[in-house]
Amino acid sequence: MKFTNSIQSQITKLFLGFTFVLSLIFSLLLLGYSWVVEDNIFNRIVKNEAEFILEQYKQSNQIVHPRSEFVSLYENWQELPGNVFHLHQLDPERIEFNLPSGGSLHVRQMVIGNKSYILAADVSKIEIGKEYLPYVSVWLVIIVLIISGLSLLISLVMARKTLKPLERLTEKVSSSKYQKIDQKFSKEFPDNEVGYLAKTFEESILHVQKVLQRESDFTRDVSHELRTPITILRNIQTKTKDHLKLDQKDFNQFSYAVSQLKLSVTTLLALAREESTELEELNFIKILEDCIINHYELSKNERFNLNIDVPNDFKVSANQILLKILLNNLLTNAVNYASGKSLSIKLVGSDIYFENRASHFELEDPFKANSRGNNSLGIGLGLNIVQRLCTAFNWRASLKSDDEMFCIIISTSPN
């Protein structure tokens, strides 16, 4: 995807602009330095000539002429060429003056005996700064252009190298709209700001995918699991509409449908809520006893034998509402589908065994959604819901069965 104001172009422009300005500053500093050095050389020449004249005067008591041809000795300021006298009056501390011919004059006031003199050096013929300025400027421009070109090349390489992980991240985030990601999504990126951004995207996308999955499961379960109890209620509604009296069988079906609807709605809504994933430490026996006491089918089945072998202090990390739903589903499966009216619940290590007598279990994948046995008359919340609840608790659900026994094992230790 092309952008009118991409990060790469911004980096290139900033880098190139910074290099150009820096090169320009250094060029100006170089020119300034050359002028300062040249001026100081001229001032040093004037100073040396002044010291020479004073030394000769001390030795011979006579004023000698300067050694350099371009240096002259004047008795007063009025004798100096051009408008030097006028400029000196405006600025008495000034030591360099421009001449009408285009050159410059460097002066130094000195006292010989009891009289003041002005030593002046006309450096017009030996100045090279102004003469070579056009050539130096051309070379400086060429150097600035070369450095700017190198800067442009380096900035393009750096920008591409820096933005490549970001572009790859953009592509992966864009493609994640059509496919699921895993925990390895952020591992492909370097351990820097881009990697941190990828990790943040990963967490956000995984969260959204979980929410969408819960919504999908909720829609699927609602459309599938509520069909049977609604059909029963509609049949009973038809009978009551025709003023027919319900017999005991119809009433039992009505009661069963209502309880299953309540259980289904509670289960589906709990699974759809994000807060249902919040876990706490719970006493397993206390939750199990509460489920047994309030279980509709179990409470009316006086002949059902329930054998519990779990310590009273056994605790699990789970969500209380979802744990009750899980246990209610396992109790319902045992009550409705056990060939012998009994259920054994025992603890082996950190694994909880729900074992009962049952006919041969023929389903290829009993934990798959919408899987039902051939003789199943229930609404089918069953083992798929149990497995999803175990996943929410970071538990594992497994099944073991033969011709006589059917056993669901819930491993409560973390995966």
Image (cartoon, helix red, strand yellow):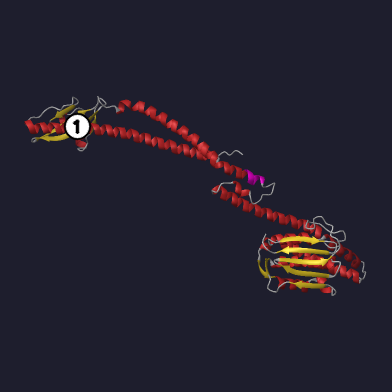
Q: Is residue 149 magenta?
A: no
Position above or below: 227 against 87: below
Magenta: main secondary structure equals helix
- From the top left corner, tell me how far across and down residue 161 is, in percent: 54, 40
| Side of 413 where 192 appears, left or right | left
Q: Quadrant of the C terminus?
A: bottom right
Give the residues drawn in magenta, as a range.
Answer: 171-175
**Quadrant in the picture for residue 273:** bottom right
Q: Secondary structure at mark 1?
A: helix
Question: 316 or 28: which is nearer to us?
Answer: 316
Question: Residue at horizontal 75%, vertical 69%?
Answer: 346
Position above or below: 86 against 223: above
| Side of 340 where 323 appears, left or right | left
Position above or below: 110 against 382: above
- From the top left corner, tell me how far across and down residue 68 is, in percent: 18, 26
Question: Residue at horizontal 49%, vertical 38%?
Answer: 13
**Quadrant in the picture for residue 247:** bottom right
Q: Identity of the amino acid at label 1?
A: Val
- From the top left corner, tell me how far across and down residue 370 is, in percent: 81, 57
Work out whether residue 168 can be spotted: yes
Question: 119 or 214: which is nearer to us?
Answer: 214
- From the top left corner, tell me how far across and down residue 53 is, in percent: 13, 31
Residue on which disc 1 sits = 46
Position above or below: 383 against 199: below
Question: 258 or 118: which is nearer to us?
Answer: 258
